[in-house]
Amino acid sequence: MVGGKMLDWAAVNLPNFDRVAPPGLLPDASVGTRPEFLRADVPATGSMSARAVARMFAALIGEVDGVRLIPPERLREVSAAAVRGTEWVFGQEASFGLGYAVEPDGAFGCAGSGGSLAYAYPELGLAVTATKTLLGDGDPMEELRLLIRDAVHAG
């Protein structure tokens, strides 16, 4: 299976990428868009809409239709760095809270290798999510997240 330019780059440039994603097993768009794959419960893979994930992240940081998933004191724990260090697969410095990556700009959330992402900004009362319908090379979603954050912050 060919993983595409992004996955080929990762195999060459990331220290442990081939150890967690062996070349013969790398998924590509032909696998990720098959109906049986989308129906399966695959670890570290989710099939959801950006709207559904945004509602979940919004309910983590505040009330949505009368529901708040965690109280404010737990939110402070979830959104604070619990562990900092060099991430094993990517070889980059990273901070993680209780289940989520914690960013220096106050966001917590996660991004996937297919380009989808979900982040919450508790101080801004903002949830930003983006999903892609097809896997492919390039990842404009991170830039989109920062543009939205900056627009809300400036507004």
Image (tube, grey):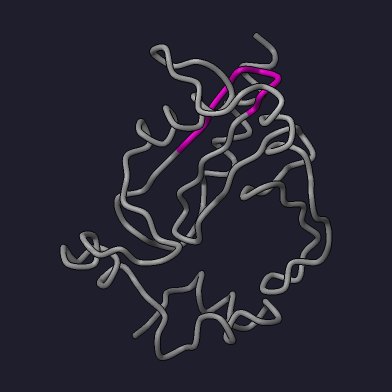
**Residue nearest the viewer, comparing 63 with 18:** 63
List the single residue furthest toward the top.
155
For the point 59% across and 24% down, the residue is: 61
For the point 37% across and 75% down, the residue is: 27
For the point 20% across and 60% down, the residue is: 39
Q: Quadrant of the C terminus?
A: top right
Q: Position of residue 79 (x, y in %)?
A: 70, 36
For the point 52% across and 79% down, the residue is: 8
**Residue nearest the viewer, comparing 82 with 53:** 82
Q: Determine the image quadrant of residue 90.
A: bottom right
Tell how many labels. Answer: 0
**Residue nearest the viewer, comparing 67 with 21:** 67
Q: Is residue 132 left or right of residue 6?
A: left
Q: Position of residue 108 (x, y in %)?
A: 65, 39
Q: Is residue 116 left or right of residue 47?
A: right
List the single residue furthest toward the left.
35
Q: Examine the structure image and report whether residue 122 is included in the region drawn in magenta.
A: yes
Q: Is 121 located above or below residue 62 in the figure?
A: below
Q: Is 84 located above or below residue 14 in the figure?
A: above
List the single residue furthest toward the bottom.
24
Q: Quadrant of the N terminus?
A: bottom left
Q: Position of residue 66 (x, y in %)?
A: 42, 12
Q: Examine the structure image and report whether residue 32 is included in the region drawn in magenta.
A: no
Q: Position of residue 74 (x, y in %)?
A: 67, 31
Q: Which segment is the magenta one? A: 121-129
Q: Is 22 located above or below residue 99 in the figure?
A: below
